[in-house]
Image (cartoon, helix red, strand yellow):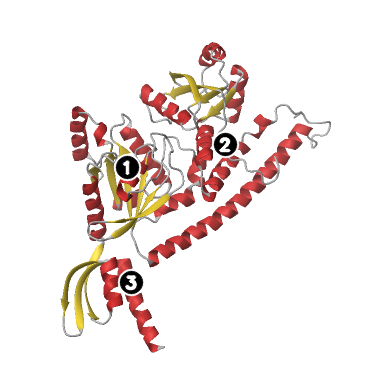
Amino acid sequence: MKDGQHMAPRHRSSGAVFIVCPYIVNGPHRIIDPQARIEEAKGLADAIQLDIKGSEYFKQHTIRPATFISKGHVEALEGPLKALEIKVVFIDANISPVQQRNLEKAWNCKVIDRTGLILEIFGARARTAEGRLQVELAALTYQRSRLVKSWTHLERQRGGLSTIGGPGETQLELDRRLIDERIGRIKKELEDVKRTRALHRKARKRVPYPIVALVGYTNAGKSTLFNQLTHADVMAEHMLFATLDPTMRRVRLSSGREIILSDTVGFISDLPTLLVAAFRATLEEVIEADLILHVRDISHPETESQSRDVLKVLKDLNLELIYEERGIEVLNKSDLLTKGNAQQLKTHARRATHPSQCVVSALTGEGIQNLLEKINVFLANKEKTYVLTLPLSDGKRIAWLYAHGEVLKREDKENEAVIKVKLSVENKERFELLERLDVEIMQI
């Protein structure tokens, strides 16, 4: 590998693909329903247009150290894989480098695990420089642990002295050093990105609009909801990880209040920790948000499991308490519910632990006005009421109050205006700063 070579995975034709979904009893994977599990695995493969030739779901009590799945299942799959001329097997689980290598030897084809495939998807979808850096960092970290797999054709036995390695081991050490150097450079570049994001957030606070961030399981309809709320044209397809890089748009509410809506990358069960760490800079937009909208596909049979996976990622980002304080659960895709399911939804809403919920269909627009009103009420409740007296000649600051607050009452007297206005604490501080600046300018 050349120094500085970009190693983020790229979409390429991999031939016929077979999907293996092992369910380990009492294991980490949350999706129990076989059909839902297979559908999600197929969705991951479809996301980079792989040619799916077949799939297999089976239960297993323990993980076999050598191959992850049992010896019987390994042997049972040899015939179908050969008959279908399978080039790649996707194991819908996170397996070790040794397990991956042993399965490749047994089946005589390439094996890719869940982390590897998600990295492939992210590599194909990243559009911004930051997104590509984050994917490359995760990919390099993942590949570093699997270098031995790439050099099995080289000699790795030691020579006469224990301190001298063969050519294969030397190549491994060289490649690992190059990867480590590249990782170090990417981390520095991402630190620069992080500082730039911090400056952008600081600039947004000077033109203060509340940030409303969309989070949720991948394919829950976040981008469709984003388009519905902002009248934008962000890519929104029935596809896992259709949105990778964050998108922001300004939205004006019926009260006149303006917000910035942020669409973020979707979460998924067993989301690789490599990606959670790499995309922390992007997800800081959620950390800084004034309000978090948790978008759920309420029509999905595993909606409860998906919700738990999203909350787990929020917890990993230390956002769990923030979401409880300033979050709204958006139950999306209500248009796909049958009458029986709709009744179940009402029951679920009554039993929900989260205090604020809103049922919507981002596709048809049903419930959108109710959601916007909930957002408006939430932000209004964060504000305090002030009575301010300003000179009538001070049109600049009077206009600022109308633009950044909710004017409840105004009474004009001879030379002054008495304005009763609702402002957030941050905007009150900015108004006072604006007042001090005007005084200083007059004194110059």
Residue farthest bottom in this picture: 443
- Measure the alpha-carbon separation of dots 1 and 3: 33 Å
Report the residue at 20% width, 79% height from top: 417
Residue 429: image tag = 3
Q: Position of residue 345 (x, y in %)?
A: 21, 35
Q: CA distance from mark 1 to mark 2?
A: 29 Å
Q: Nearer the viewer, residue 235 or 321?
A: 235
Q: Dot 3, crowdedness within 10 Å: few (<14), some or many (≥20)?
A: few
Q: Residue furthest right?
A: 160
Pointer 1 residue: 295
- Nearest to the observer: residue 18 or residue 367: 367
Say the numbered circle drawn on residue 32. none
Lower position in the chain sequence, tag 3 or tag 2: 2
The answer to whether marks 1 and 3 mark residues whose Cβ atoms lie closer than 8 Å is no
Q: Is residue 141 visible?
A: yes
Q: Nearer the N terminus, badge 1 or badge 3?
A: 1
Badge 1 or badge 2: first in the primary sequence: 2
The image quarter containing residue 174 is: top right
Q: Position of residue 48 (x, y in %)?
A: 50, 32
Marks 3 & 2, CB-CB < 8 Å contact: no
Q: What's the CA distance linking mark 3 and mark 2?
A: 48 Å
Taking the spot 31% from the left edge, 68% from the top edge, the residue there is 427
Is disc 1 placed on a helix, strand or loop? strand
Give the residue pinned by disc 2.
Answer: 10
Secondary structure, mark 3, is helix
Q: Identify the amino acid type marked 1.
A: Val
Q: Nearer the viewer, mark 3 or mark 2?
A: 2
Indicate the amino acid at tag 2: Arg
On the image, the x and y values in percent for residue 209 come to 34, 61
Q: Residue at x 32, y 49 (%)?
A: 231
Q: Establish if 426 lies above or below 6.
A: below
341 relative position to 428: left or right: left
